């Protein structure tokens, strides 16, 4: 299992690639952007599969929280697929809506990253407390 810093490095690399694709989409035109949309959908599905792998290691009582998160992500992917680009009649409105959605998704990712850090720090604090009491804990995986 990757350490938390390795997962953060992966997140950082993905963010950099997203920035590069967005910059290129600005200059390459609609056809290129449409091909990339399909590629990104595939990447979202792959990310959901990796999420599912982590999910399987969670204790049963935690899975309900993860179920809700996973369902929301899948639903948003399906909505994006169904909505497509529209017929152009609402282009300006859809453009503004998608920009807002992108900004909110980034803010959500930042919040989730900070939450991951909080959980990891809590785990470390709990491990120190257990060790101070003479209890052994498993090696950290996050």
Image (spheres, rainbow, N blue to C red):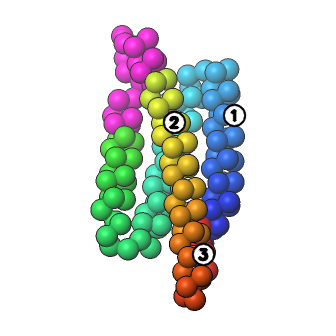
Location of residue 112 in the rendering, given as x and y in whole percent from the top left corner: 50, 48
94 or 141: which is nearer to us?
Answer: 141
Give the residue at x 57% y 36%: 36
Tag nearer the camera, 2 or 3: 3
> Badge 3, how many Cα within 10 Å: few under 14, some, many 20+?
some
Marks 2 and 3 in Cβ contact (< 8 Å): no
Report the residue at 34% width, 65% height from top.
63
**N-term-proximal mark, 3 vs 1:** 1
- The disc, 2 or 3, on the residue closer to the chain's N-terminal end is 2
Front in this rendered view, residue 62 or 134 = 134
Location of residue 88 in the rendering, given as x and y in whole percent from the top left corner = 40, 13
Q: Is residue 83 magenta?
A: yes
Mark 3 = which residue? 128
Q: Can residue 66 be seen by looking at this rendering?
A: yes
Q: Which residue in the protein does label 1 denote?
A: 20
The span shown in magenta is: 79-98
Q: Which residue is mark 2?
A: 107
Q: Identify whether 95 is placed above or below 9.
A: above
């Amino acid at each position: 299992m990757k350490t938390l810093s390795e997962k953060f490095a992966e997140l950082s690399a993905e963010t950099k690639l997203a920035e590069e694709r967005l910059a290129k989409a600005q200059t390459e035109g609609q056809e290129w952007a449409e091909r990339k949309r399909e590629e990104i959908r595939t990447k979202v599905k792959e990310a959901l599969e990796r999420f599912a792998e982590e999910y399987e290691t969670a204790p049963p009582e935690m899975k309900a929280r993860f179920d809700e998160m996973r369902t929301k992500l899948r639903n948003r992917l399906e909505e994006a697929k169904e909505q497509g680009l529209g017929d152009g009649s609402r282009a300006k409105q859809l453009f503004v809506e998608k920009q807002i959605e992108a900004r909110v998704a980034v803010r959500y990712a930042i919040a989730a990253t900070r939450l991951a850090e909080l959980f990891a720090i809590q785990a470390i604090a709990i491990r120190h407390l257990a060790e101070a009491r003479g209890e052994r804990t498993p090696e950290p995986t996050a």
